[in-house]
Image (cartoon, helix red, strand yellow):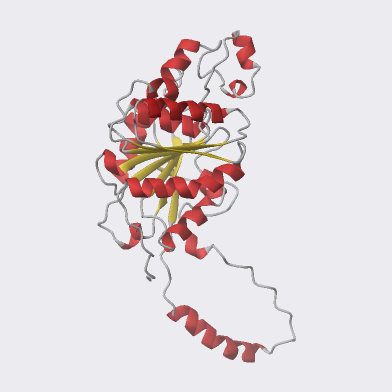
Amino acid sequence: MNDRAFGGRGFSRDINCANFSGLQPLKPHRPGLFPRRLALVALLPLLFLVLAAPARAGARAECRSVPSKILGHPVPYCILLPPSYDTQKTRRFPVLYFLHGLGGNDQMLIDSGAMNVIDSMWEDGKLGQFLIVTPDAYTSFYINSFNGRDRYQSFFLHEFMPFIERNYRTLPGRQYRGISGISMGGYGALHLAFSYPWLFGSVTASSAALVAHLPRITSAGVRSLPFFRALNGVFGDPFNRAFWDRNDPLHLARTANLSGLKIEFDCGEQDSYGFEYGAIELNKILDARHIPHVFHLYPGTHDWEYFAARIPAALQFQSRAFGLHPRPHPATR
């Protein structure tokens, strides 16, 4: 297990949000305005208050990598550990696999500032405490590629999940294992949850890459569409329609045994790729099968502003699915 520093930030691999959130840089001292001895005396009460005040145990992130025989190279991941993970050494936690979108990576929740939002939700008692882990998935769509060269789905199921659940204190059983994602990650979350519902008790997806009506055009025509230009041969080169259908969450939703799976998904009404039509289609399929689920269309397009606004609600849905009853985290040293 290799440790990595946060890219471009100069942080070590472990970060305590309480040390960084909400702090403002100090202004430089102007010499000659305040005698040094007097300054020291004046600062002593403040120093005493700082040392005496209880320090809050905040969330912590680890960014490391998992060795993979299936892929032939290490795969980076980041995991957010809730405040009680370090203060209650024997406690075990549910785990949420949070999948990034196309162009994202394992540090999505950290680089975007979402980690600070999540830590505040934990502190304020708006979210139960569970582990949140994001693996790097580049442009894999979280499936095994058509040509068989990139077996990301096999890696995720047979190497990554077992690694996380061996090396971190997780609770066993599908009811304590959830999966979530945005865009490509939303596709991956729905695909994996619908393909392996006995592994996951809950799934949430925001702006999932769902295509309601795939155009019946030539492979060259498919490559001309903005969304399909990003597929990089995952679904075949030329594009293989039958392979797409086998992996499509909409196709899986029509036949999969989804009993007991808690499902929530949403999409922007003006999605840049038209994914709202795919979300509407998924809603219709689940309604027709009388499968309980939560579905929302919100104003917005396919961008980070929309995704960021939806993350808290998705995490709260997962928290309820885990059976957690959040409450404010007590101050600890």
Pinpoint residue 129: horizontal percent, then vertical percent: 36, 54
Pinpoint residue 254: horizontal percent, then vertical percent: 37, 21
Does residue 173 lie above or below 153 as drawn? below
Which is nearer the eye, 327 or 147? 327
Q: In this view, does 78 lie to the left or right of 321?
A: right
Does residue 295 lie above or below 151 as drawn? below
Does residue 109 lie above or below 54 as drawn? above
Which is nearer the eye, 307 or 135? 307
Pinpoint residue 222: horizontal percent, then vertical percent: 61, 14
Residue 146 visible? The answer is no
Residue beneath the point at 57% across and 86% down: 43
Quadrant where the C terminus is found in the figure: bottom left
Residue beneath the point at 27% across and 52% down: 92
Residue beneath the point at 44% across and 23% down: 250
Q: Is residue 176 left or right of residue 30?
A: left
Q: State which quadrant residue 269 falls in.
A: top right
Which is nearer the eye, 97 or 278? 278
Quadrant where the N terminus is found in the figure: top left
